[in-house]
Image (tube, grey):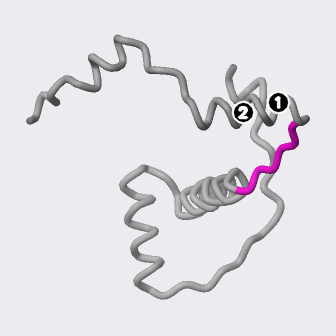
Amino acid sequence: MSSATHPAPTRDQAINIRATRQQRDLIDHAASVLGKSRSDFMLESACLAAEDALLDRTYFVLDPDSFDQLTELLENPPDPPEGLREFLARKAPWE
């Protein structure tokens, strides 16, 4: 789908922060390497950090039977498939 059919939402909210010159220069350099503007780089980075912070705190509720099943799987995980065991036993090409 092209952006012509689905335009990006308008950015109408300002976020202002203070930084040291070194922090700004570091951010500018990273943004430049990725071909992004400072704003795009900072917004994407902040959103990824926010998602990670929230995902680390995800809360879910299970009924007692489902909780028991989950606990059983966590305490006694199934054996990995043979193909995975073989793959993990291989020496890495750079070793």
Residue identified by numbered label 1: 66
Residue 64, position as x, y percentages in the image: 88, 36
Tell me the kind of residue under disc 1.
Answer: Ser
Q: Which mark is residue 89?
A: none
Tell me the kind of residue under disc 2.
Answer: Leu
Numbered disc 1: secondary structure: helix
Residue identified by numbered label 2: 70
The 10 Å Cα crowd at callout 1, few under 14, some 14 to 19, many 20 or more, is few
The reply to whether dot 2 and dot 1 touch (C-beta < 8 Å) is yes
Foreground residue among 36 and 62: 62
- Is residue 58 rendered to the left or right of residue 20? right
- Is residue 83 rendered to the left or right of residue 69? left
User: Looking at the image, which residue sits at the far left?
Assistant: 95
Q: Identify the residue at horizontal 45%, vertical 59% (top origin).
A: 31
Is residue 17 in the magenta section?
Answer: no
Quarter of the figure with residue 86: top left
Is residue 60 in the magenta section?
Answer: yes
Q: Which residues are magenta?
A: 57-62
Residue 61, position as x, y percentages in the image: 87, 42
- Is residue 63 rendered to the left or right of residue 86? right
Q: Identify the residue at horizontal 49%, vertical 88% (top origin).
A: 20
Foreground residue among 70 and 23: 70
10 relative to 27, above or below: above
The 10 Å Cα crowd at callout 2, few under 14, some 14 to 19, many 20 or more, is some
10 relative to 38, above or below: above
